[in-house]
Amino acid sequence: MSQPATQLSAERLVHAPSAGDEWWRRSVIYQVYPRSFRDTTGDGMGDLPGITRELHHIASLGVDAVWLSPFCRSPQKDAGYDVSDYCDVDPMFGTLDDFDDLVAEARRHDLKIIVDLVPNHCSDAHPLFQAALAAAPGSPERELFHFRDGRGPDGNEPPNNWQSHFGGPAWTRTTDDDGAPGQWYLHLFDSSQPDFNWDSDAVRAEFERILRFWLDRGAGGFRVDVAHALIKEPGLPDWGGRPDGRSTEGFPFSDAPMFGRAAVHDVFRSWRQLVEEYDGDRILCGEANAHPVETMADWVRSDEMHQTFNFDYLGAAWGAASFRGVVERSLAAFDAVGAPTTWVLSNHDITRHSTRFGLGMTGRVNEGGKISDLVVDEDLGLRRARAASLFTLALPGGVYLYQGEELGLPDFLDLPDEFRQDPTFFRTRGERVGRDGCRVPLPWVAGAPGLGFSTLPGSSEHDDAAPTSNAWLPQPRHWDRYARDVQAGDPDSTLELYRRALAARAERGLGLGDLAWLETRPDGTTDVAAYRNGRTVVVLNSGDEPADLPAGSILLESTPGAIDADGRLVPDAAAWLDVEH
Ligand code: NOJ
């Protein structure tokens, strides 16, 4: 028995067309993870010239901008999110000249380059932190960070109960020059990532200098790391959360004394003014991991950032009801402040959506889960991922794509432990596997050594059981099937599906459009979600039975055969239709 017919007549408008038409209200931004995009030197590590060289592939998708994960000088303890010089390129990625070449090439393709800025913390190798370590307690140098005396008889206990997001205490004790134990410093992430003290005017001035440095070099704006955590509650109070007295790990928002303090918004208000001094409609996009989504919208009030990543959407379980719920809440929350919602399905911190949706479970699965112990149906995951992507790409607002999702890449779940690099893996002694599985170098050429990721022939190989590639993370052997060269030109491929959907999104002006739900079942528990944006209707079927489609001509289907001989949408599929309006 099929699902009841989708009724075009029973519409409920939940989002009016966008008020403004600035590019960032409807943008599609492609995230490049430089380590894993393209290696032109054969050292197994992606680099900026590799991005420049292959930029035409990104441009051909029809995106507006490229966000580069960190490429600044860094000891790479957290894959570049531990910066030791904010105004230079790490030699492993190239030089400042290479950055300039990339910006110039991007201009030729009408693409903007968004720089990843990491203001919450730096590397412990940063000269300012080294100077703070060398200086005395209470010195101006230490004021730039959060240094405190320990608690307990000999100061042996951390100053408060906060936990690092990567596991273990958020404090590390220093050693004084004479070898005696000294003060402690705060790090919400790895011990190699000391948190800046954003109550310090000197820290604010330093970051204004850094913003200008990249804007002057042609950056189209910034993705702002950990934009919810810069300001800490004065006095750094304990935060209850667990019966053992330790604070909760991870990103629960609520009343946490290190997240979403009111004063953090002043920082971004001043940055908004700063970027507006420059021409070209440059943007700030916050990684404001704030819950619920209504709270997140505070970061995009009209005088603050332009965009935030929608983490509720990123964390949504597979299924029509789940997606529909998040879309509705998100549009209401962001409309209330006049900002676009951004839709994100994958990034470098979370299990790729084609793996998440192929797991025999629902709910949020991120780097914290031991997902390698779970059963994944890779084909089912890919089918659902394509359906979810199609459902997403017609939504009004902005879209973020993570490199490789246009190829349908899954995570490398069986990555052998000896290759793991994520500090989470080490700080939890392997209890949490970390995020390496979604960061594996891209497959460019099927059958080529290293799947064509590195330039030098024979410089890397791939093997599921015992990878011998020189790529910084090995690629699974069966990734031949996902290689870009195999997919290019194949009308059934994931790559061509993305191209067609992104072209139709642009042609139909969907990013600036409206959204009305089509009623599919009165009780609201349907496994079918259907919405109209202008003349485009999108239907997603996450149920077990085929679903009827409204009248209209089919524009796109998520997989070949998504529409059966009776004209119904099969399970785990999505379709776009053109309808009379
Ligand atoms: C968020 C980044 O996306 C993640 O990769 C990083 O580990 C943390 N912030 C710390 O900078």
Image (cartoon, grey):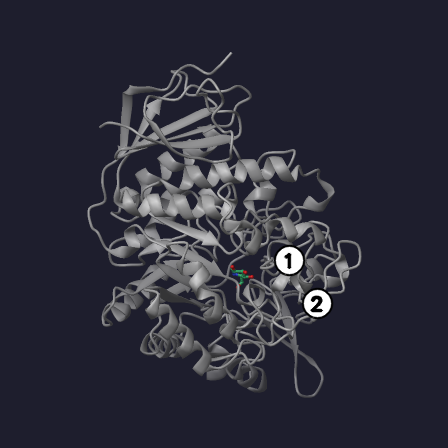
Residue 35, given in percent of the width and then of the height, sits at: 57, 67
Judged from this view, the residue extending furthest toward the right is 466
In the rendered structure, which disc, 2 or 1, sits on the residue that comes first in sequence?
Answer: 1
Residue shown at 42% from the left, 37% from the top = 391
Instruction: Give the SS element for disc 1.
Output: helix
Foreground: 252 or 135? 252
Decide which of 154, 581 is in the foreground and name it.
581
Q: Which residue is mark 1?
A: 436
Q: Quadrant of the C terminus?
A: top left
Residue located at (24% from left, 27% from top): 580
Say few, some or many: other residues with alpha carbon within 10 Å of mark 2 (under 14 / 14 to 19 / 20 or more).
many
Secondary element at image label 2 = loop
Residue 460: mark: 2
Q: Residue at x 65, y 46 (%)?
A: 369
Q: Is residue 478 above or below residue 177?
A: above
C-alpha span from label 2 to label 1 = 18 Å
* Residue 283: % across, % down: 31, 62
Q: Would residue 357 be found to the left or right of residue 581 on screen?
A: right
Q: Looking at the picture, does residue 399 appear above or below residue 448?
A: above
Which mark is nearer the camera, 2 or 1? Answer: 2
Residue 256: x, y in percent? 48, 52
Mark 2: amino acid: Ser
Residue ranking furthest to the front: 489
